[in-house]
Structures are given as C-alpha cells and as structure tokens.
Image (cartoon, rainbow, N blue to C red):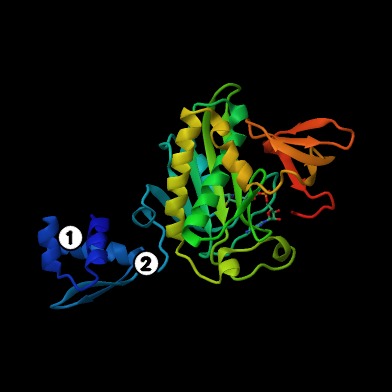
Amino acid sequence: MKYKILALLKEKGDYVSGEDLAKVFGVSRAAIWKNISKLKDEGYNIASVSNKGYLLEGYGDILNEFEIGHKCVYKQEVTSTNDVAKELARKGCEDWLVVLADKQVGGKGRLGRVWEAEKGQNIALSVVLRPNISPVEAPQLTLITGIAVARAIKKVCGCEPKIKWPNDIILNGKKIVGILTEISAEIEHINYVVVGIGVNVNQEKYDGELSKKATSLFIENNKKYRRSDIIRVIIDELSEIYNRFLNENGFACCREEYLALCVNVGKEAKAIYRNKEICGRVIDINKNGELILKTEAGEEVIIYAGEVSLRTSDNQYI
Ligand code: BT5
C-alpha cells in the first residue's frame, strides 16, 4: 500500500489530498496518514499541509524494493551483505532475494581480503541464487555477473568499463567493482550461491594504497548517481544473462562478450596461485571461464577462477 501511495505522489508531482488518496485506495484517511509516516521513516521527504494534502518533495537515494524494482532486504549497517544473504539462504529464503546495505563494517574481498567503502555512497549488493549446476561451474557466475554489471554501468553512466578476469571491473585502469561469489554445496549439488557485488558509486576519494587502484563513478565521470538506478539495471542484466547461462550452455553463451570486455587476453600476467607464482601470456579464456596462461617454456596452464590473483608481470594491479 505505501508504495502505491508513493507511486501516485511521484506521478502527480503536486499536492494530493488525504481524502483523494483515501478514495483511490479505498481506505480511511488515518490509514493513508499511517502509510505516509512509514514512507517518511524510510527517508522520503513528504510535506503535509492542511487543506492541500501531501506532496513528495524529494527522495534522495533511498534503497528499497520500490526504488530498485525488485524484492530486497535493506539494512543500514551490516557486517557484510554476503553474510546476511548466506544466513537468509540457510533459512530457506527464495531465489533472487537481494540484500542491500548502506554500510558494511566487515565487507569482504576474496581470500580473506577486505572491501572498503564509505557509508551511503556506494553499492553493496548480494543476491541469493540456487542454480542447478555443478559446484565446479560456480565461478562462472562471477564472470557472468561481471558482464551484467559492466553492461549496467555502460547503460546508466555511458562509460565503457572493462573486466579484469575474474572478478574486477575497471574504468580507466582502476577498479570500480569487485565481485565475491560464495557457495554452499555438497560434492555434486549446490545448496545456494551468494553473489556479492560492490560498486564504487559516489565516493569522492580513496586514501593510502587504495588511491592507486580504486576509483568511483563520481571520480571518473564527475557526476553523482542514484544508486537505485544502477541497481535496477544490474538486476535486469543479471537476470537476462543468468537465464541464458542456465538454459543455454553455461559461460560459453556469453564468452564472446566476456572476451570483448576483458583486458587480460594477449597480455603478460602473473598468477598467484596457492602462494606460487606462474608467469606467462594470457592466451585465452575457455568455455568454462578458465584462464589459459602460456608460460615461457611453452606450457599451457589452465587457471581456475576461484583461487587466483592476477597481476601484470611487473607486479602492477593491471
Ligand atoms: C573483490 O575481492 O574485489 C570482491 C569484493 C566484493 C565486495 C562485495 S560488496 C557486497 C558483498 N559483501 C561483501 O562483504 N563483499 C561483497 P578481491 O579481488 O579480493 O579484491 C579485494 C581488494 O580490492 C582489496 O584487497 C583491496 O586492495 C581492493 N579494494 C578494497 N576495497 C576496494 C574498493 N572499494 N574499490 C576498489 N578496490 C578495493
């Protein structure tokens, strides 16, 4: 009900009386007032003037299911949206539940690394999926998510982000998105997957080490974005590509698109794999989403996405 009232206020862009709202929705004026209060609590700036009614004056950058167009759980602060999503998945939540937060105090990267993002400026999103695929195929979900997010950024912001295999999206050589896929599985069966996406949106600066490799959409485009506009498109693109991934032939269905976005192919790289370094030239990403590295000795090594960090041969991030 509250979002129906909100939709009407947005559409009108002018005062609507409590009486008219009550009539439209077939409820009492007190019920309307209650719902308006709930909307105000969520952060909507709604003026109420006697004899005129209610006016939606502003709505900033609010994250809820109305703004993102999809069912979601929103929290102001969490340890990690991936952890919240995993907990909900364990308790049996539905497929495609999206978890969002304004602030993560324990944001996670891969391999125990930390994901840092200022409160209220960025996107921390996790989605619960239950794909009927083998656990070894799960890292491919990171790759297709990369494509979905790159597409979304291009659509909303007009820029052309690239992908650094397996899980980074970069803009002008710096990281703008990180993806962390976690799974709960038996040997042959996935219970659930949580795909976590961190997008640097409106953050104005990065300090210390991070300033060398992180950037945001604001820094690159000198423009602030409404996070919900980006989230909405991420979810649309992800569901399009995910359905194809399941119904067609896995990552192979979008490998060409991935290759066109990927910055690694043809470049020298160093893979840090279980504390061992393997150097070579990236010659391909195969239909399973694995990276093929050709060493100086001419040996072709297949690198599995789950457990590796990729550096340039002189140890740079990209
Ligand atoms: C990642 O790991 O890039 C995965 C990041 C996933 C974050 C999302 S946010 C929603 C969900 N909830 C979570 O708790 N996590 C997911 P990795 O490839 O390991 O990269 C981590 C490294 O990126 C760190 O060691 C830093 O060097 C760098 N880093 C940290 N914060 C960054 C940021 N905001 N932007 C760019 N780089 C960052």
Say which residue appears at 42% left-offset and 37% top-offset. Answer: 93
Q: Is residue 252 rendered to the left or right of residue 228?
A: right
Which quadrant does the N terminus fall into? bottom left
Mark 2 or mark 1, which is nearer to you? Answer: 2
Image spot of residue 15 (x, y percent): 19, 73
Q: Which mark is residue 250?
A: none
Task: Count neighbours of disc 1 (C-alpha within 10 A) and say few if under 14, some if 14 to 19, many if 20 or more.
Answer: some
Amino acid type indicated by mark 2: Gly
**Could you tell me which secondary element the residue under label 2 belongs to?**
loop
Image spot of residue 81 (x, y percent): 53, 49
Amino acid type indicated by mark 1: Ala
Task: Count neighbours of disc 2 (C-alpha within 10 A) and say few if under 14, some if 14 to 19, many if 20 or more.
Answer: some
Name the residue carrying label 2: 43
Name the residue carrying label 1: 31
CB under 8 Å between discs 2 and 1: no
Counting residues from the start of the chain, the first of labels 2 and 1 encountered is: 1
Position of 315 relative to 188 (above/below): below
Cα gap from disc 2 to disc 1, whole angstroms: 19 Å
Q: Quadrant of residue 27?
A: bottom left
Image spot of residue 143 (x, y percent): 59, 41
Say which residue appears at 60% left-offset and 61% top-offset. Answer: 117
